[in-house]
Amino acid sequence: MADTINSLYYKALKAAAKRRVSKGEPRLSRIEREKFVKGVKTRVRRKLPRKVLVRGRRWRQHTYGNTYFTAEIFVNDKLVHKISREYGYGDHYLDVAWEWLEKNKYVPSRETYPSGGKQAAWRHAQDLGIKLERDVIDVPRKRDL
């Protein structure tokens, strides 16, 4: 049963590669294909996005010094998700957005290091050939989030 599922999966992957070549898009390298199909046995995942844009807004709570953010995630210039107000500073908005993309199968999961950390989102996008754009602005009021 598992062999049948795997062979059907690879046939679908091969057909998708032929369609990409006929459209003039480059084929996936062996390493990219292995990263893309790692752990998949029963269904075909969606194609990797060409472009991911994450727009963030940060607000600093002056009384306690906490920082909050919201973010919008665009995949191939289409809005796919809005992250509501969440605690975090720096580029945390990008990490949360990338985790959402992984969870919803837009991109494969990042490798976890022995120390427990994960590969940076920008590096993972670069390895997969995805153009990652990020934009963040600091807003003065909570209601501007």
Image (cartoon, rainbow, N blue to C red):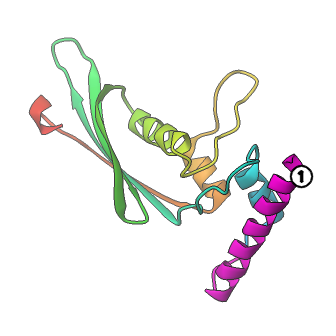
Q: Quadrant of the C terminus?
A: top left
Residue 83 location, x and y as percent? 32, 38
**Residue beneath label 1, please?**
3
Q: Secondary structure at mark 1?
A: helix
Q: Main secondary structure of the magenta part?
A: helix
From what the image shows, is residue 31 above or below residue 102? below
Looking at the image, the residue that sits furthest to the front is: 1
Is 17 magenta? The answer is yes
Residue 75 location, x and y as percent? 43, 59
- Name the residue located 76 percent from the left edge and 47 percent from the top edge: 41
Residue 79 location, x and y as percent? 33, 56
- Name the residue located 77 percent from the left edge and 72 percent from the top edge: 14
Is 24 magenta? The answer is yes
* Extent of the magenta region: 1-26
The quarter holding residue 127 reads bottom right
Q: Nearer the viewer, residue 9 or 56?
A: 9
